Image: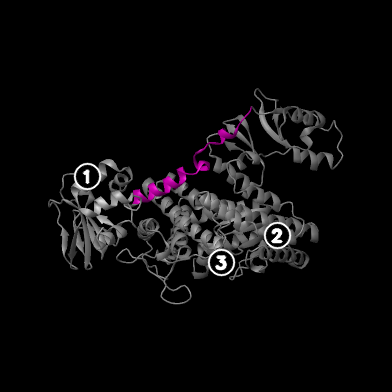
């Protein structure tokens, strides 16, 4: 092949839809290409004119317009245009104009038609628009992972084994032994139909019965677990995994309405989920000191990398990593109470930020607080809670969770207060949305009670939703604040990079990607009264209220998933190469597929911010990029 044709082939082979084509097919395409140069300002395609070429941009930038004259898109190196007319009647539907000097490869319509009819990937690519391509890319990733598509019922291999709540301890143990099960469902048979009331497991028999030498005739209801965590038979395996991680349970009854379909165990999921994050959580609770927790923490990054390499999606990974972090905190609180004695008054330990949203990764610091009972007397009680907070904070630092540079930790007396004070904080932030209040809102409005009197946190969530959803003024200020961080997409759909400092020539996928998304999703969620914390769950709630069109909510979901997974892969690669993971990406380190779809995702974020400004009359936003 001539050097010039070889150069053309090598270039188009970097970009979809050509990047997955065999070499022989690329050579046939290149053989028919015409190379054309257009000066900046030149009209390339006129509305309604006859066009027989697919245009591929080798260099430069082109603006695409709707028939109304409204700007539709900007495309640059490696992107194509003119395909929609070729699929219809060879008439131009979207006019195109060069906005920079452009070198264009023109592929004849005969080649286009052949590819369109014979290459399914090519046809998929040219038939759908940017947002649909992004959705297709996300969907392909999800379908490749069986955890995402398999229902929990696949894990049910037998009928549930149950007994009435009136059964005695010895009889319950015999039933479990005879049936070879590690968990026994306990049914209330006092009504017309048996109703699931509780569960007893092998572990319960050891820790609650044998350890305390209970008599064999002890009613099983004395030691069974009630208030069960269950899962619907319609749920997916990955949802069961996240439920187990979030609640630290090893057995989940599977329900079809009020009927029990079966019980799935941790070991059932591990058959599908080999990265062992569930085992890691289990091991955390078996450690008896900080030294043991620190040793276990070395496995966290390995677990993260295994999940990435097995194509888990960002929701699964974020929830798993948050579950691991939550477990470290919970075990440290247990160890702290063993060391310091029982707490003098009830309290709740709150996780904030990404852990509360189930969106935590490996580059993270501590964000936590304490809500104390209103009987709190500082002179009598605070010495204990400060010591406990310091024990937990120092322990988390030992386990790789850095101290918060903004001092958003329970060791700070401001964030270790009675419930009534916290209610006053949130009320003031909503009613007086000044700069500091808005900063606190972005941090503290993502909250989750992970230990102790978790009802305290539920009360705060209720207060937040009721007051925020009813205050248009607060939502306007919060929306304005959410517009301060913008996606790194320039006028010509090029990436806007850091100009100086140690991260020069990079862009930050958290600060410029996932953070702006979670900020604007939070505003809409508060506006529609959602109590959810996770961004994907918030989008579901938002879609139900019609505040956003269903398609717009879907676009935001796909953008969040794609940006998140590129960020996750970037961190996993750094770990595998022995480098310290971060959020700063160089465009040249991304594949053409990632660059192209990141641009689509960032454009969705940009459009969503424009709607946010309009929806909440937040036109006074300042840009802080």
User: Residue lying furthest top in this view?
Assistant: 192
On screen, residue 284 above or below 189: below
Q: Nearer the viewer, residue 42 or 28?
A: 28
Q: CA distance from mark 1 to mark 2?
A: 60 Å
Q: How would you rate the neighbour count of disc 2 (Cα within 10 Å): few for under 14, some for 14-19, many for 20 or more?
A: few
On screen, residue 394 above or below 458: below
* Residues shaded magenta: 131-158
Residue at the location (49% across, 60% down)?
Answer: 570
For the N terminus, the quadrant is bottom left
Residue at the location (35% across, 60% down)?
Answer: 610
Residue at the location (60% across, 34% down)?
Answer: 254
Query: Which of disc 1 and disc 3 is earlier in sequence?
Result: 1
From the image, tell me which residue sits under label 2: 295
Is residue 375 among what the camera can see?
A: yes
For the C terminus, the quadrant is bottom left
Tell me where residue 373 appears, x and y as whole percent.
70, 57
Tell me the SS state at disc 2.
Answer: helix
Comparing labels 1 and 2, the label whose residue is closer to the camera = 1
Q: How is the image coloured?
A: one colour
Q: How would you rate the neighbour count of disc 3 (Cα within 10 Å): few for under 14, some for 14-19, many for 20 or more?
A: few
From the image, tell me which residue sits under label 1: 113
C-beta proximity under 8 Å, tags 1 and 2: no
Query: Which of disc 2 and disc 1 is earlier in sequence?
Result: 1
Q: Is residue 132 located in the magenta-colored stretch of the structure? A: yes
Q: Is residue 606 left or right of residue 219?
A: left
From the image, tell me which residue sits under label 3: 580
Tell me where residue 147 appears, x and y as whole percent.
53, 42
């Amino acid at each position: 092949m001539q050097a010039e044709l070889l150069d053309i082939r090598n270039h188009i082979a970097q970009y979809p839809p050509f990047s997955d084509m065999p070499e022989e097919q690329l050579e046939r395409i290149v053989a028919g290409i015409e190379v054309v140069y257009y000066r900046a300002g030149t009209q390339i395609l006129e509305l309604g004119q006859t066009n027989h070429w697919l245009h591929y941009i080798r260099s430069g930038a082109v603006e695409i317009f709707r028939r109304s004259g409204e700007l539709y898109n900007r495309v640059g190196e490696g992107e194509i245009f003119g395909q929609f007319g070729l699929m219809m009647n060879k008439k131009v539907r979207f006019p195109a104009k060069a906005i920079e000097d452009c070198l264009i490869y023109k592929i004849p319509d005969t080649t286009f038609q052949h590819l369109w009819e014979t290459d399914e990937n090519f046809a998929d690519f040219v038939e759908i628009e940017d947002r649909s391509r992004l959705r297709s890319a996300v969907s392909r990733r999800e379908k490749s992972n069986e955890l995402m598509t398999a229902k929990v019922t696949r894990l049910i291999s037998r009928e549930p084994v149950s007994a009435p709540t009136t059964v005695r301890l010895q009889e319950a143990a015999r039933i479990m032994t005879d049936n070879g099960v590690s968990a026994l469902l306990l049914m209330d048979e006092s009504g017309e139909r048996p109703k699931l009331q509780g569960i007893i497991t092998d572990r319960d028999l050891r820790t609650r019965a044998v350890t305390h030498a209970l008599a064999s005739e002890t009613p099983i209801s004395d030691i069974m677990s009630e208030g069960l965590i269950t899962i619907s038979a319609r749920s997916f395996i990955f949802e069961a995994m996240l439920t187990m991680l979030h609640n630290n349970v090893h057995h989940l009854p599977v329900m079809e309405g009020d009927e029990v379909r079966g019980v799935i165990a941790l070991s059932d999921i591990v058959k599908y989920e080999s990265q062992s994050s569930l085992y890691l959580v289990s091991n955390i609770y078996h450690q008896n000191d900080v030294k043991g927790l620190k040793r276990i923490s070395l496995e966290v990054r390995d677990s993260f990398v295994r999940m990435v390499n097995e194509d888990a999606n960002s929701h699964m990974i974020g929830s798993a990593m948050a579950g691991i972090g939550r477990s470290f905190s919970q075990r440290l609180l247990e160890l702290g109470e063993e060391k310091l004695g029982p707490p003098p008054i009830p309290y709740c330990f709150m996780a904030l930020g990404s852990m509360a949203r189930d969106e935590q990764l490996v580059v993270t610091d501590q964000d936590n607080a304490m809500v104390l009972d209103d009987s709190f007397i500082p002179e009598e009680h605070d010495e204990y809670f400060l010591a406990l907070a310091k024990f937990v904070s120092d322990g988390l630092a030992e386990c790789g969770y850095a101290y918060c540079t903004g001092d958003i930790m329970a060791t700070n007396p401001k964030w270790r207060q009675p419930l009534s004070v916290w209610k006053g904080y949130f009320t003031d932030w909503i009613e007086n949305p000044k700069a500091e209040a808005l900063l606190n809102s972005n941090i503290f409005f993502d909250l989750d009670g992970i230990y102790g009197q978790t009802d305290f946190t539920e009360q705060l969530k209720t207060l937040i939703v009721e007051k925020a959803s009813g205050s248009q003024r607060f939502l306007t200020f919060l929306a304005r604040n959410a517009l301060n961080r913008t996606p790194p997409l320039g006028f010509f759909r090029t990436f806007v990079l850091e100009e100086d400092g140690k991260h020069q020539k990079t862009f930050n996928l958290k600060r410029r990607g996932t953070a702006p998304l979670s900020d604007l999703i939070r505003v809409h969620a508060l506006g529609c009264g959602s109590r959810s914390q996770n961004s994907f769950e918030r989008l579901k709630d938002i879609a139900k209220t019609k505040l956003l069109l269903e398609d717009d909510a879907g676009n935001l979901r796909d953008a969040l998933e794609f940006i998140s997974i590129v960020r996750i892969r970037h961190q996993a690669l750094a770990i595998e190469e022995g480098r310290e993971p971060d959020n700063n990406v160089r465009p040249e380190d991304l594949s053409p597929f990632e660059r192209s779809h990141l641009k689509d995702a960032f454009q969705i974020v940009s459009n969503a911010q424009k709607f946010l400004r309009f929806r909440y009359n937040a036109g006074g936003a300042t840009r802080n990029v």
